[in-house]
Image: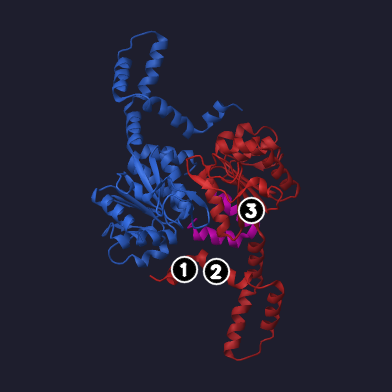
Chain colours: A blue, B red
């Protein structure tokens, strides 16, 4: 089986290569010139076929997708004891959507031992990106991880800045209950979390027993098996419903 | 919130600690002596209460679970380009079930770059465990990973030995189609795979369009979002239905 045949069977790889070709190698000015050129074509059949293909690439829908996928970024914090399905599920799906994901190790750049002993290497030390801007900050769950993030003043600082900027904060499992509460994030909002933590939320949060809950700039979710709903909701918020549907289809979800 | 309170909220941690206490620190002979002692107790209320608790620990159901969880082992092969959700989802759930999981790096012990750029460190070099016995061999998907495993004579050797021994082989996504076919594993069996690969299976396999398919010693599954069904079926085969139900409940699945 040839490489090309295999490539065409993986819609994600194909769309990634296509997006690279059509939106990344040219400047905005070059794109505008091509668009004007396409609209002015009055040639023979072959030229008109080319025009049709390019009009599709430059359709408002494609341009919106391109705009979304080129602009969105997310920081996923990786503490020791993170629930590896919640961590990897989110990073994987966000990257499939074209979001630039940075994995920041809470304790530096060394490999992190997750809750079921999977060793994952962060992209960067969290300290080195603490002042950077991201469209979303994502917190995986895992009891040990949620505890570390609750006690980390750096995590608190990052979350408070993100909240002040009105940008997205997403958390799953124990993290909405433990980390949000510790750093007073999203008070008076509707949130969800791993159900056995709901009584710890106190009076400043309204618990909603659903797989994923969005209230303004907060997206929260319940546990390992709800990670797809969680990540797809983040993608929908950052990149639109069409993109989240495309990713859901790739992973055979729903 | 105290550590103990948090511990009681994580059923997996609690059952792990309980299992450690009741089944791991004593030898088989010591267990038998305790069982005989318990049955011979004819004492006061406190002693009879102790007897009741120990009879529960030594019930046939508990002993079957203990037998399963202490004996099962799995080797998960980790090649470059592995689909990280399929890899991590399986390792995580199998470890939750008490199965001893070894992650063998196809290209050694260095960190492995998965299909969406997550870097994962294997437990061992696959070469170092190629002659060891495992109750299950598990292959994650990912196009690059499936290709590498198809071309790896070491993978072929491990799979052929496992098949000859009549023990479990489990594969997901592109791997059932590409790796099984390349190494002539499970011929004439019913299998499933990522649906776009079904036409490549040829006449020696029967494709079944379900999330997870078991035919004897083969368990196969379709893609990232079917990883929970896949791992739970492996757990059911190795540890019984009660254990797979317990793990499903922990991760809030179904």
Q: Give the residue at mark 1.
A: B7
Please tell me which residue lies in front, B191 or A72.
A72
Q: Where is residue A182 in the image (x, y as percent from the top left)?
A: 32, 62
Label 1 in the same subunit as label 2: yes
Counting residues from the start of the chain, the first of labels 3 and 1 encountered is 1
Q: Which x, y percent locates residue B108?
A: 60, 44
Residue nearest the viewer, comparing A197 with B122: B122
Question: Above or below — where is A37 with respect to B134?
Answer: above
Q: In this view, does B210 lie to the left or right of A88?
A: right
Dot 2 corresponds to which residue?
B17
As for residue B106 lying within the magenta part, the answer is no
Mark 1 chain: B
Q: In this view, does B135 lie above or below B114?
A: below
Q: Can residue B226 be seen in this view?
A: no
Percent position (x, y) of residue B59? 65, 73
The quarter of the picture where residue A135 lies is top left
* CB under 8 Å between discs 3 and 1: no
């Amino acid at each position: 089986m040839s490489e090309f045949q295999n490539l065409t069977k993986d819609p994600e790889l194909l769309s990634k290569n296509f997006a690279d070709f059509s939106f990344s190698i040219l400047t905005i000015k070059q794109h505008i010139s091509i668009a004007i050129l396409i609209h002015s074509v009055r040639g023979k059949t072959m030229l008109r076929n080319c025009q049709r293909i390019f009009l599709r690439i430059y359709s408002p829908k494609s341009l919106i997708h391109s705009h979304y996928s080129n602009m969105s970024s997310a920081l996923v914090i990786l503490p020791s004891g993170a629930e590896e399905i919640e961590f990897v599920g989110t990073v994987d799906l966000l990257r499939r959507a074209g979001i630039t994901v940075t994995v920041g190790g809470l304790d530096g750049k060394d490999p992190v031992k997750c809750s079921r002993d999977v060793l994952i290497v962060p992209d960067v030390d969290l300290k080195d990106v603490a002042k950077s801007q991201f469209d979303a900050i994502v917190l995986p769950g895992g009891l040990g991880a949620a505890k570390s993030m609750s006690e980390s003043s750096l995590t608190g600082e990052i979350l408070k800045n993100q909240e002040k900027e009105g940008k997205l904060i997403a958390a799953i499992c124990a993290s909405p209950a433990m980390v949000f509460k510790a750093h007073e994030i999203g008070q008076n909002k509707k949130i969800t979390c791993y159900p056995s933590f709901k009584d710890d939320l106190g009076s400043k949060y309204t618990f909603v027993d659903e797989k994923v809950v969005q209230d303004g700039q907060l997206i929260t979710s319940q546990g390992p098996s709800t990670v797809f709903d969680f990540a797809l909701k983040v993608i929908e918020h950052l990149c639109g419903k069409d993109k989240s549907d495309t990713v859901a289809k790739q992973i055979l979800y729903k």
